[in-house]
Amino acid sequence: MNEAEIFKVLADPTRRAILERLSGDELTATDLREGFAISQPALSQHIAVLKGAGLISERREGRFAHYRVDASGFAPLHGWLARYRDFWPSRIDSLKDLLREMDQ
Amino acid sequence: MNEAEIFKVLADPTRRAILERLSGDELTATDLREGFAISQPALSQHIAVLKGAGLISERREGRFAHYRVDASGFAPLHGWLARYRDFWPSRIDSLKDLLREMDQ
DNA sequence: ACGACTCATAAGTCCGTGCTTATGTATGTG
DNA sequence: CACATACATAAGCACGGACTTATGAGTCGT
């Protein structure tokens, strides 16, 4: 997926909230619905969009669908965003330090 | 600015194209319009949105308005996105390679 | 002062999209 | 088998937002 679709997908606050609830845990659609003042079809549609963008993955188990974040789907976003950081130098310096430590 | 507004702002392809043309250079609104099949007011409105989100800054010079990327405006996005990366190890490996090259 | 130029604002139109209710499909349970 | 449960799909509506044309507000040259 390209960053064009990903940005469009993430522009919706409900979808970002879904991702937030999925970060760490793996949840079913019904579990996810807790705390959302939204109909079941609406949630299902959002899930379909997130899945289509490759941001979450599905694990079927009988009639239950378990969803989890697919962090690799965010890669295009990282790539796009890398262009707009002007604080690389200091970051690279701290990374150098970090890597030096890790090498020991 | 919070990530909610930033995602909404970046969901528009024209605005992302504006940012891309501004990455590096500083351009006037008229310069920016080159290559866009869009009316002047439309571009002006996009610029206002980008400015409102803190993603670009303006430098007035007579009747000309010079625009440039304000990379610090992307900070909330970096913060939000940091939550969704689980592939740090491989990334760090490529960074090691990159830094080794830079050291030479 | 007047006209040309750069950019912003106003007002209105149109399309995409997120929501709803209704229904479909598949998997359980008695 | 009949019914409940979990989720997906269909269809229609309503609102937001990106675009247009028209106009306004400053700034420069002659």
Image (tube, coloured by chain):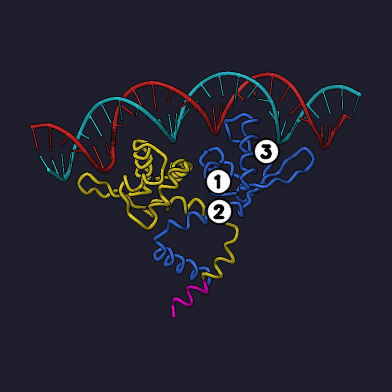
Chain colours: A yellow, B blue, C cyan, D red
Is circle 3 on the same chain as circle 2?
yes
Q: Main secondary structure of the magenta part?
A: helix
Q: Position of residue C29 (x, y in %)?
A: 15, 45
Which residue lies most toward the bottom here? A104
Residue at x 64%, y 43% (from the top left corner): B52
**Between residues B77 and A30, which one lies in front from this camera angle?**
A30
Q: Measure the alpha-carbon separation of dots 2 and 1.
A: 8 Å
Upstream in sequence: badge 3 or badge 2: 3
What is the three-letter code of the residue carrying label 2? Pro
Is residue B64 among the parts visible in the rendering?
yes
Left or right: where A5 falls relative to C28? right
Is circle 1 on the same chain as circle 3?
yes
Residue that numbered label 1 is attached to? B6
Q: Counting other residues with Cα less than 10 Å from the Cα at mark 1, is it few (<14), some (14-19), or many (20 or more)?
A: many
Q: Measure the alpha-carbon separation of dots 3 and 2.
A: 26 Å
**Between residues B55 and D17, which one lies in front from this camera angle?**
D17
Left or right: where B59 falls relative to B48? right
Q: Is residue A37 above or below residue C4?
A: below
Residue that numbered label 2 is attached to? B76
What is the three-letter code of the residue carrying label 1? Ile
The reply to whether discs 2 and 1 touch (Cβ–Cβ < 8 Å) is yes
**Foreground disc of the pair 1, 3:** 1
Residue at x 65%, y 39% (from the top left corner): B48
Upstream in sequence: badge 2 or badge 1: 1
Q: Measure the alpha-carbon separation of dots 1 and 3.
A: 21 Å
The segment highlighted magenta reads A96-104
What is the three-letter code of the residue carrying label 3? Ala
Numbered disc 3: secondary structure:
helix
Numbered disc 1: secondary structure:
helix
